[in-house]
Amino acid sequence: MGRDLTALFDPASVAVVGASDDPAKYGHAVASQALRAPGRRPVHLVNRRGGTVLGRTAATSLSAIGEPVELVVISVPGAGFEAAVDDALACGAKAIVAITAGFAEAGPSGLARQRAVADRVRAAGAVLVGPNCLGIADNTTELYLASDRFAPGGVALLSQSGNLALELQLRGEPYGLGFSRFVSLGNQADVTLVDLVEDCARHRPTSAIAVYAEDFGDGRAFAAAAAAAGKPVVLLTAGRGSASARSAQSHTGALTTSADVVAAACRDAGVELVRTPREMTVVLAALAAGPRTAGRRTAVFTDGGGHGAVAADAAEDAGLDVPELDAATQDGLRNVLWEQSSVGNPVDLAGMGEQRPLSYADTVGELLAADGVDAVLMTGYFGGYAASEGGLGGGADGGSVLAEGETRAAKEIVAHLAAAAKPLVVQSMYPRSASCRVLSEAGVPVFAATEDAARALAAMTGRAGAGPGGGAVPPLPPAAAPLRDPGYHAVRALLADAGVPFPAAREVTGEAGLLAAAAEFEGPYVLKALHVLHKSDAGGVALRLADREALLAAYREMHGRLGAPAYSVEAMADLTDGVELIVGVDRDPRFGPVAMVGLGGVLTETLRDVAFALAPVPAGRAGELLRSLRSAALLDGVRGRPALDVAAAAAAVERITAVAAAHPEIAELEVNPLLVRPDGALALDARAVLH
């Protein structure tokens, strides 16, 4: 059930320690907000000098109040913070909001102080938000303990930035977005982002959870909480594009950036990942609007070819499909439009809207009713007639007629939408016109920018059923006995024991062992120099050695050049009709094991055709990742080549990633290449890097 945060969001009483009459102090702003609902609960102001604050008598200490206080806000200089926490706990506080800064963000000594305070709070059975936070607010319980007001609504906003929270409020206002709760995360010394997501998921007035976070703490637990929330979670984070600071020793480590990790976690958890506050607002507006659908087949509709073409491109950029409409749908459109209208996709009225504004509604009705259409994006001039009655239409009288017709069309569009229950998003040159207001007031998202409309529609589509989430974070398996030897053959044996197939191989240290190994299986052979990083780059791999003589010659040449301490003699796999893949797992400090699959072999880092997911990866999900690659067509056979055994490749991915997930001591695990043929999959090389 998660932690009980009732005392944090609906306390019986509140005290503000550090309340002040000085507008420059945060204690003044918080105290002012706390007094907005004096009838809801007792609010006590505490200032060590006593006197009056904001016209009310201030207590000199918490103990001087003379009664228990359930929630205490602490906004005092750092030197007095610990004493204030102790006083709060002594007065029976069950929740503390710590505004005071100067802890983990200030260095190791501050971190030690922060941990000690958090330990004391938890030992007392209380909860702590912060330190170094900007307060909290809950519009549903009239709890106002932040410096600014937040318009009431259904979004719970959990943010590490106060200014970004204010920007989101300003951007959300035109779309009618409001907030059920606001929590400034601070340093998350006790109450974490995961705790808050879980609590907001249980909070009935909250319909969506918006998160701005730079520090996820336990990122995997965050993803799991978001997947289980049962309501939309939208994430804005910073630093997604920076590569890992540690030096990677495998292709997987070199190719995996923090951006890939966060994106993979969000995809698996069903979280909407956004890049800017504007995009977050667009997505939240879409999620607060009409129905959602699992399909992405989008009909683009306009009364102007340019808008249609641009919108179609924007829709595809957002991940939507814009297929040509089927014959039955095109016939239905021809019955309501005139001859010059285009009915393929985009659908273009070709000027008919100026003659008959109701043609907009007729077209939307046909598209929403079409079996081959999952969602509709209407773009362009709609709204212009109502916005300017003296514009197109032959003067004021004609403009009035068109404006009235457009408003009627908007009302009919709303009626069609209610009957069809499919997503409709509108981009208009005149988004604040009377006819567009009819749409927005009925829950149709209306945007001024084409890219915003496309992104909003993407947030409303591609979901299992019509509900939020649809994601699942794979649980980590129990830890297996640690791998002590990261050598090539030990890693090979570890994976083979898990069911990953390899060609026959023997480790050798001299010519006698080389010839003995060659006698155990027939050629052609492969010779690999062991304990050499990136063997292929170093010239430490020889392929297609036809017989023992060729194997011995290759060994002598390679050993003379590299002097490796050991070598591997292996049976040469049949590469005919095969494709080489890479399967790797990199252990992220926040999200745990993250899997990468992609086009493998020596060109892995050059081609960078890879996909990511949290590990372990079930076979079904592995198949989806493989099909998402740019080169996925190779799996189905091209230019007369047979289709490959994708199921065998997916099964190998499942086994490799399960091994990595069960071995937390492994920092990087990689099979490259994994050869996929029409009759199965075979791992041709493997390596592991221990922490």
Image (cartoon, grey):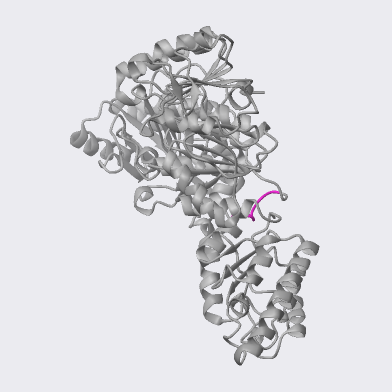
Front in this rendered view, residue 483 or 567 = 483
Q: Quadrant of residue 293?
A: bottom right
**In the picture provided, is 424 more to the left or to the right than 137?**
right
Say which residue appears at 48% left-offset and 54% top-offset: 278
Front in this rendered view, residue 184 or 672 = 184
Q: Is residue 460 magenta?
A: yes
Up-down: is 627 above or below 323?
above
Q: Quadrant of residue 381?
A: bottom right
Residue 503 visible (yes or no): no
Q: Quick one: quadrant of the N terminus?
A: top right
Furthest residue to the bottom? 394
Up-down: is 413 above or below 258?
below
Q: Main secondary structure of the magenta part?
A: loop
**In the picture provided, is 394 more to the left or to the right than 332?**
left
Question: Which span of residues is magenta-colored?
Answer: 459-464
Residue 143 drawn at (x, y percent): 59, 31
Residue 411 drawn at (x, y percent): 74, 70
**In the picture provided, is 572 more to the left or to the right than 541?**
right
